[in-house]
């Protein structure tokens, strides 16, 4: 999948998270990695006020997306997802937080 094609998939995933559609968001993930993929990772759990996609890139055979969510209850969250090809579909296989410049306590 080209980066432009992955961009569409990733943007739709982020929109699902921001809208609180966890069924759609979880469907985009490697099912056997749930719930372990969330261990130690801050993710939006409530209302998302706004979001900004910071980066979408290729790393070898993987695709990586980075987004900053601003939430009503959990503050600002920098979230990186690493996607891998599973059969004929790209799925989020790993999550990690990243520090958002200018925001304290989000490392």
Image (cartoon, rainbow, N blue to C red):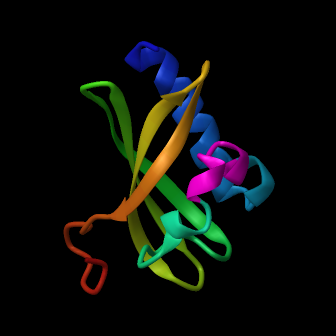
- Image: 64 above or below 81: above
Residue 99 spot, x, y in % from top left? 24, 69
| Placement of the C terminus among the 4 image quadrants | bottom left
- Residue name at image x 59 percent, y 80 percent: 72
Residue 94 spot, x, y in % from top left? 43, 53
- Image: 90 above or below 38: above
Residue 29: in magenta span: yes
Total numbered labels placed on residues in the image: 0
Toward the viewer: 8 or 103? 8
Choose top left, top right, bottom left or bottom right for residue 56: top left
4 lies left or right of 14: left
- Magenta span dominant secondary structure: helix
- Image: 25 above or below 60: below
- Furthest-top residue in this view: 2
Residue 50 spot, x, y in % from top left? 54, 60
- Image: 50 above or below 12: below
Residue 106 spot, x, y in % from top left? 31, 79
Judge whether residue 21 can be spotted in this image.
no
Q: Which region of the structure is painted magenta?
A: 25-33
- Residue name at image x 61 percent, y 42 percent: 13
88 lies left or right of 74: right
- Residue name at image x 48 percent, y 47 percent: 93
Residue 105: in magenta span: no
Toward the viewer: 28 or 5? 28
Choose top left, top right, bottom left or bottom right for residue 22: bottom right
- Residue name at image x 53 percent, y 68 percent: 36
Judge whether residue 7 can be spotted in this image.
yes
């Amino acid at each position: 999948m080209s980066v432009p094609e992955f961009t569409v998939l990733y943007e739709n995933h982020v929109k699902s998270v921001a809208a609180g559609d966890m069924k759609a968001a979880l469907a985009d993930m490697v099912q056997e990695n749930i719930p372990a993929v969330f261990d130690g990772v801050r993710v939006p759990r409530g209302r998302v006020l706004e979001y900004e996609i910071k980066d979408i890139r290729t790393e070898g055979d993987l695709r990586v997306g980075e987004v900053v969510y601003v939430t009503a209850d959990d503050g600002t969250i920098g979230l990186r997802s690493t996607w891998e090809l599973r059969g004929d579909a790209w799925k989020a296989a790993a999550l990690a937080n990243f520090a958002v410049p200018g925001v304290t306590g989000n490392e």
